Every structure is written in structure tokens, then in C-alpha cells.
Amino acid sequence: MSTPIEATAILQRRRSSVEDTRSSGLSPEPRELSYAQAIQEAMAIAMERDERVFLMGEDIGVYGGAFQVTGDLVHRFGADRVMDTPISELGSAGVAIGAALTGLRPIFEFQFSDFSALAMEQIVNQAAKLRFMLGGAVSVPLVMRFPSGSGTGAAAQHSQSLEAWFAHVPGLKVVQPATPHDAKGCLLAAIADPDPVMIFEHKLLYKMKGEVPEGHYTVPLGKARLCRPGRDVTIVATSIMVHRSLAAAEELSREGIEAEVIDLRSLRPLDRDTLTQSVKRTHRLVCVYEGVKTLGIGAELSASIAESDAFDYLDAPILRLGGAECPIPYNPELEKAAVPQTPTIIAAVRDLIGGRL
């Protein structure tokens, strides 16, 4: 039973927590929204708060977007702020960059992340470099949204995970929100950012529901999230792999293996400190991501640990679980086999803990 002094301290902490939540614009009782609804709400809030914010993309107007993320925003804000673009990713990306240079804040949606290959010249050679090349005299406050990933049976040209391409380029920021909460908060943070931000949204997450506070709030870009504490191994994951890693961790805990799970959230900037401190606690590291294993984000994470003082804490080799070295197949069973699944993660951690790797 608490003493009067302890009870007073608890009450003060609770009041402080509520006050902190209110001051940050968060609701003390979040509602449940789907990942897609959270993104749509973020765009609506930004457009209501700032008339410079507008949307661009193929079929985002009356149709509501290929994945129905923009929904009815064209009816709420009009066709001059929710603009359907031609089937020309290169040209439309150039328009978005030009608009950002004039002080507007465009949000450009690629219908599929794969189509960004058609716009790489504008993104990599223009958006990423103009602020640097002009000595900081201009900024490019541009957000690009990329529906990405496999699992929908869309085959090789509509299912890729290309985020590592963009994370390789200085001048671009790259994020992969894994929850509805982060989908909204990261997007609002990206809209406010003076630099180009690439947001990769896994298509299988659009229907996932979770707690999302009302109103305006931001999730800091470049800060990872500790999803589950553990003592035996660190699993650092991105996007949908966060959920598969958490499911694996729950199964492993029944065997006495306690996995710590980190949601990387941001590929550039990269939160190396959170990862380093976790590895020092657990002495093992598994990197799980959907992009092709070779030269994927797992390689950078592994190098970061190898180059840090956490390297001396390792009791086993660093393990990378990435996509297979092939295009995404159309066949459903082959499609699943081409990217890490929960059983894959469980088996890999067992082998790592058991010294078989």
C-alpha cells in the first residue's frame, strides 16, 4: 500500500504526463485508425493549417488514389490542391520540385514505389542537391510518398522495396513508418521539414489499425523506437518486418529467448546510438528488412556496429535477413519465400543463440 507521500508523487507524475501530452498536441485517449486513414488525416491537417501544402499524383483525385489513401480530399480541398497528374513520373516530379523551390510544400504520391525509377534524375540530381549546390540559398520542402513492398500479388514491377537506393543519396531523408501512429507523425514531421523527405509505406500496412492521437503531432525523423525490451538478441527491423519480428519475439520468449526489437523508422538520418546501446545489452544483432539483402540497409547497420565500440560486446556474428536475390515472383508461395517471414526470423535467432551460425 502506498504511503501518502508516494501517492502524492504518483498523482503528480500522472498529472505531469497528461500535461505533457496536451502541450504536445496529443489526445490523452487516442482513437484507432487504419494506417491509410492516419496518412489521410495527416495530409488533411497539414492542408488546413498551411495553404502552401498540396497533393500531386496519378489518380489521387476523384478516384482517391490506387490504395484509397487520399480518399475524399479532392472534395474537401478542391482539384487545385489535390492534383491528378499525367502518367509521367519524371515530368511530375520536376513540377513538384519546382513548386517546392517557389515556397510551396507539395506531397507527391507515386502510384507504386517501383515507378520512382522513372523519376530518379529529378529526385537524385535535382531535389537532393539543389540546396547544397546553391549554398543554402534555397530549400526543397518536398514530400514523396512511395507505396512499396510485396504481398499483394503484384509481381516483379510493382512489389519492390527500393528505400536503400534513396538512403544512399546525401540530401534526401528516408523514413519507413511501421504503425498508424508513426505514419501520421512522420508525415507531419516530413511536411514541416525544409529538405526532401521520402516516405516508404508498405502496402500490406494500409489496413492495419492502431492508436492514433487526434490533432497535430510529429514523430522526429531519425529516431528509432524500442518496441520490445530483451536481453538475448537485438532484432532491428523496418516497416512490416517490425511486426513480423515482434511476432517472432513472442514465440521465442516461450522458449526462454528474450529478443529486443527495434523499429528503425528512419534510414536517413540513421539512429546509430539506439542500435549501439541495444547491442551492448544483448550482445547479438539480427537485421531484418524486405529489400534485397545485398547492399541493403542491413549492410549499413552491420558496418555501424563493426565500426563502433559495441563490436567488442558481440558474442556471435551479425546476421542479415533480407530479400532474396531475385525479382519478386507472382506466384503467392514464391512471393512469400522471397522475403523474410516470421518463421524465418524465429529459425535464424534460434541458430544464432544456439551457436549454429
Image (cartoon, rainbow, N blue to C red):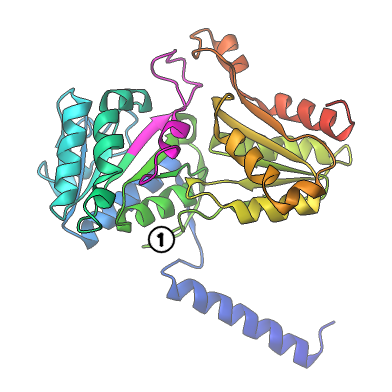
- Range shown magenta: 145-172
Give how far across and how far down residue 276 sits, in percent.
Answer: 68, 52
> Which is more toward the observer, 67 or 127?
127
- Amino acid type of disc 1? Glu
Give how far across and how far down residue 88 sits, in percent.
Answer: 18, 24
* 27 relative position to 66: left or right: right
> Which is more toward the observer, 247 or 122?
122
Q: Quadrant of residue 12?
A: bottom right
* 142 relative position to 238: left or right: left
- Look at the picture and state if 203 lies above or below 339: below
Residue 62 appears in the figure: yes
Q: Quadrant of residue 277?
A: bottom right
* 105 relative position to 349: left or right: left
Q: Secondary structure at mark 1?
A: loop
State whether the magenta stretch is mostly helix, strand or loop.
loop
Q: Residue furthest left?
A: 80
Q: Residue at x 81, y 84 (%)?
A: 2
Residue 202 appears in the figure: no
- Look at the picture and state if 82 lies above or below 101: above
- Look at the picture and state if 256 lies above or below 274: above
Q: Residues within 10 Å of mark 1 (few under 14, many from 20)?
A: some
Q: Which residue is mark 1?
A: 214
Q: Residue at x 20, y 56 (%)?
A: 138
- Look at the picture and state if 320 lies above or below 96: above
Give how far across and how far down residue 14 sits, in percent.
Answer: 62, 78
Q: Residue furthest top?
A: 331
Q: Residue furthest bottom?
A: 5
Does the magenta run of residues contain 308? no
Does the magenta run of residues contain 164? yes
Q: Quadrant of the C terminus?
A: top right
Q: Residue at x 41, y 69 (%)?
A: 25
